[in-house]
Amino acid sequence: MKAFEWVSPASVEEAVSLLKSAPASKDVDEAARPLAGGQDLLTTMKDYLTRPVRVVNLKGIRGLDRVEGDGKKGLRLGALVTLAQVEEHAGIRRDFPGLAEAAHSVATQQIRNLGTVGGNLCQRPRCWYYRLEEAVCIKKGGSECFAATGENKYNAIFGGGPSWIVHPSDLAPMLVALGASVNVSGPDGRRAIPLEKFFTLPSEGSIRRENVLKNDELITEVTVPASPFAARSTYLKFKERESLDFALSSVAAAVELGPDKRVRQARIVLGGVAPVPWRVPKAEEFLKGRALDAESLAGAARLALEGAEPLSQNAYKIPLTQTLVRRALAKAGGVSA
Amino acid sequence: MQQQSPAKKKKKIKVPRVVNGVDTLVEIEVDDDGSVAWGPNDKHALLNHRLPRVDGHVKVSGAAEYTHDRRPPGMLYGRVLRSPHAHARVLKVDASAARGIPGVKAVVASTDDPARKELVVLFAGQPVAAVAAETPEIAEDALRAIRVDYEVLPHLVRAEDSVKEGAPKVFADPKEPNVEPRDKRGDASKVAEALKGADVVVEAEYRTPIIHHSSLETHGNVVDYRGGEEATVYASTQGTFTIPGDAAQELGLKESAVRAVVEHMGGGFGSKFGIGVEGMLACQLSKQAKAPVHLMLTRKDEFLLAGNRSGSWQKFKAGATKDGTLVALHAVQYRLGGLGDGSQAGQPYIYAAANAYREGYSIHTHEDASRAMRAPGHPQASFAVESLMDELAYKLGMDAVEFRKKNLKDAVYHRQLDRGAREIGWGRRNKTPGAGAGPLKRGMGCGIGTWGGGGNDECKVDVTVARDGSVSVAVGTQDLGTGTRTYTRAIVAEELGLQIKDVAERIGDSRLGSANSSGGSTTAASLAPSVKDAAVKARLAVAERLSPLLGGAKPEEITFSNGGVSGGGKTLSWRQACAALPAAGVTGHGVWQTSLAGRGVHGVCFAEVEVDVETGRVRPIKMVHVQDIGLPLNRLAVESQMNGGMIQSLGMALWEGRVMDAKLGLQLNPGFGDYKLPGALEMPELVPLIDDEDTREAVIGVGEPSIIPAVGAVANAVHNACGVRVRELPITPDKILMGLLSERRGA
Amino acid sequence: MADEHDVKSSRHQESPPDPSRRRFLKGVGIAGAGAAIADHLAQTAEAEATAARAEAAKLPTAGPLELALDVNGRRRAVSVEPRTTLLNALRNHLEPAVTGPKLVCDQGTCGACTVLLDGKPVYSCLVLAADAAGKKVTTVEGLGTPEQPNAVQAAFVEQDALMCGFCTPGFVTTVTAYLKKNPNPTLAEVREACKGNFCRCGTYPRVFEAALAAAKGTVSDK
């Protein structure tokens, strides 16, 4: 880890100011970074993927670790709420079960005891080229995505180019499915950003970043609106190694069923297959008015993976994700897959 | 491998005796069933029982001091700078900035010695410099302040690329080609002829990737040299006595002036012999700084430069007749050991083929040299031939176990196959691979392995009985986690009729009696006989002293049991007995006894797995391993080691493997995130079965044999479950899903 | 590439004072982590000095930081850089060193460095020492001794839940914390609790047995 300045402000305003006032850096990965749980940030620092000149510790800021609200009023999660808090929170388990499942699916209890909601959304990609210091890929200021023609079994089948990373967050697909927003504080004050617009494709925003946050901005809170489908939400994550792994593919699903058991609306967001949480509106649309049965599940699964553009080694993600879509929808809807 | 029983012969042994007040060794004769025999395996007081390990309490409480934990006063932290290029000429190493960082106490660079030939790095990860500093943080900064100029040369990290016409050379030396022939055996034309007469023929290629030892304690040493004539090296090693010579050479000292200490070590699995490049660098740093240097590799270092199990690429053409006889087998075996030769057991491994031919080669690449890893070459060979046997059996429509028996001469395999099949419930298996409703399919498979083992005469053991009744056993050997300390104590305690707690062991120190390195499962078979010999001699020496107190009973007839010593109709307590010893106590000097060691074992593994054919997940359900090992010194530890073998084998089958990028020449998964060791949720029910029908009264190591057969068993179980034959390890979900897709397309 | 980073310039370098920042920090008082430090050590004579240090920590500093770590119930003063992890501080900066937690992967992927932070298992390689100040750090040494092992430690020995033993402190720590949370677990729950700890020798089945035995209280007293 490269040496850095350390500071523990007591308020969001101070934190923002300290991010802004940090010594100028030559490279975006040397910019000051806020430290929440640190479960990803420290790993990137140890491998010199990020080399922040200043680390602004957020844990001295009071009030960012609260869970408020419920399924009726909507949910407010402070950025410093830990994943362990989310998975164990009775109200979340009851009213937003998919969110509790997504939190539980992250890594291990050791990570979840420290890892935070804000940090989970802001973690850096897991592509092994990105994670390998010696491979100066396009995400690190190089000119090439080595995965495009290299060892790409874990890489993107949607939204790729000019980088084929996948977003590693488990909370993100679920929160996008639930229509969540993030509250962001910066030098110009606060703004709310729908999570769906928070993440950026490599072809959209800066190739060096995965979201719209500026260097001197912080996520302070995640808000999840009350919705008719939150209580029927679920998160299915498929790992190559069950004990500890990132998703090869995951599916966040939520459905609202009418009294006739037909789908009123559905949300389907894929994880681990694209550089951002990948919502599949066509499949959502398809389900409207249909009962969840083998046929409709298969149809939704097919549509969900329509347009996938696999690389040389990751075509398996298509059948895999189709299975997960079917199973997630079935689970959310309370039917058998 | 044939089981070999110990030779039963009459022996003369030397025992200490006091003659005219002087300790001398005298030769005594031992009967045929005399002292230096283990006796029947089921008649032991301690051995062949379940003995909790004696170093358990220090290990579970964090008190055990491993090499990584050593903190001699004034210690510096060393780090190694690795080449980021797979093949490059080092033009210049500029360490001036590093030397200028406060707290940096020593820097060594490959270019320090102007007399040395230019350095060409041959793999990404090869050390080019090293530093020692007051803190780990400063050492890291110093490392990154070193500037190295490289001339990058073309690299090869794929066997397929290395064998291509016109490929760049891995080694500069023209005498070292990219592809080196190894062994050749049999008559290829006869095999080709025999294949014509076969009813079924299978032609297949099997591949296994490079596997990492992944010892949790990385390689490394703490070299305590402060100038002067002597040094102590704390080493994480499998060979206490491999350290002093290596270190002495680097430090410019006499070998006898360097003491190696291996109190506890955190795993080796074949990768830790000698001081290694990291140890040489630590010595150079320590010598330069005149201070102790702690140089333990980082995890990434460990992946890149600390050795590995060679990969394999094996091509077969084999044929069998309808009755299940393997009539012909042609094998081409490539060992993929990077810069090293790699290893591979020759095909058809344990099977009898009427006509067999094989040729073996090493294919070199720009990757660090392979090292021995737990049963070198055997899991690779076993996986391939067991897959092949299965393919032949299915093609013949024959039961996979019956087909194997038909082609195995050794009856031990037959009995072990029967036992394993019973235990796993072989009758329940899928008769047709992939059969059954629903996405979750169960399947079973089996595999077989063999190992030699055996002991040697390197161990010199002292067992000392003091006048106060305390007993100690001392030998410089090392305990890799195999339970060496525990059986060493137990042998002595049993011989003297005491309990384990009554004996203290001292090991892991080159100042103590010599011992062999722990490789090839030879430790127990070398050490245990020597300990036994020392204990017997100590017992006889005590008995000799007590004879007058026990009615003149002959020393050989005096019995030691339950903490008492009896003879001539009298019994003394241990304390009373020892009070009769001379002030210095008595010591038995033990050497190896051929009759106490055996070699040659068989192992059979059965696995049951569940495959989700809609996701490709393989869930291991149960594994059974049947193993003969002669006399199990400690059943608890033997079973633990067998569990460990099954688990490592399972890891190789389903998750593990080095991944290289051909273009960059870099390993993409040099860490435990992407190099996936099996964890708690991957564990099946594990059933380690000691084959007690092996009644050899001889010690045989069990470390290696237990890792061999499970890889094939798991691969065959996967096929039996879902119908997909994955011929390249690891068997990951992508391969199963794509395999199912191509089967469906084919159908 | 890494070797282009100017390492020297960033070491032991205080950032230039920023009057505006100093102004708004003034009067904010001790809060957050600073408050936690102050609360924890309020009884000690050094509370005031600590509070002053906490206040000083509000200014960006490249260190060294003078920290008071609470390790196994003992207050341990240590001077480290901001980048020093808790694991590194325990093993390499405390005198005498606390070497029960092992450095194995340094990436939060193996569990050998597991310690309890305010009673919860965490990877100490992924916690900055500065961030652990004011919290209770419990290492395997704080759970029991060779002479007086806790129930989990005794069960590990009895069930032979260790071989080389290098992963063992992490497992013992994880299992001890888990049994406190769930004293009567199922095998499935034990496996789930252990999934963040990796072993190479292959002790898992016996780790599970040991955890269940410790929970059932069937471990013989030592």
Image (spheres, coloured by chain):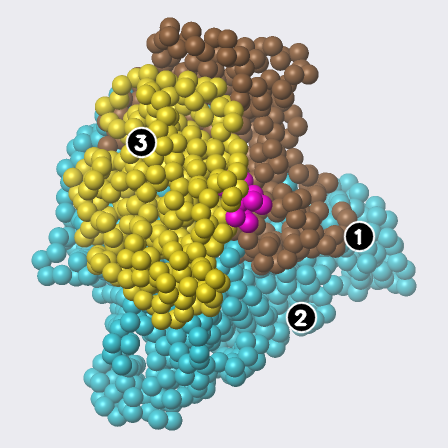
Verify whether residue A156 appears in magenta: no
Closer-to-camera residue (A244/B455): A244
Name the chain under label 2: B
The chain displayed yellow equals A
Which SS type dominates the magenta stretch?
Answer: helix
Question: Where does the image place residue A199, in percent across and percent down from the top left?
Answer: 30, 40
Lower sequence index among marks 1 and 2: 2
Check disc 1 and give the amino acid type. Arg
Q: Left or right: where does residue B148 sit relative to residue A120?
A: left
Of tags 1 and 2, the one toward the viewer is 2
Marks 1 and 3 sit apart, C-alpha to C-alpha, by 85 Å
Q: Residue at x 56, y 29 (%)?
A: C97
Name the residue tied to disc 1. B545
Q: What chain does badge 3 belong to?
A: A
Task: Give the SS element for disc 3.
Answer: loop
Visible residue check, residue C144: yes
Span of residues in magenta: A82-95
Q: Colour of chain B?
A: cyan
Q: In this figure, which residue is indicated by the disc labeled 2?
A: B41
Q: Colour of chain C?
A: brown
Say which quarter of the image contains residue B301.
top left
Q: What amino acid is labelled 2 in the image?
A: Asn
Residue A213: mark: 3
In percent of width and height, residue B283 lies at 40, 33
In which quarter of the view is residue A280 placed? Answer: bottom left
Vertical arrangement, residue A278 with respect to residue A122, above or below: below
Q: As rendered, which of C177 and B328 lies closer to the eye?
A: C177
Host chain of mark 1: B
Q: Residues within 10 Å of mark 1 (few under 14, many from 20)?
A: many
Circle 2 crowding by C-alpha within 10 Å: few under 14, some 14–19, many from 20: some
Three-letter amino acid code of the residue under disc 3: Leu
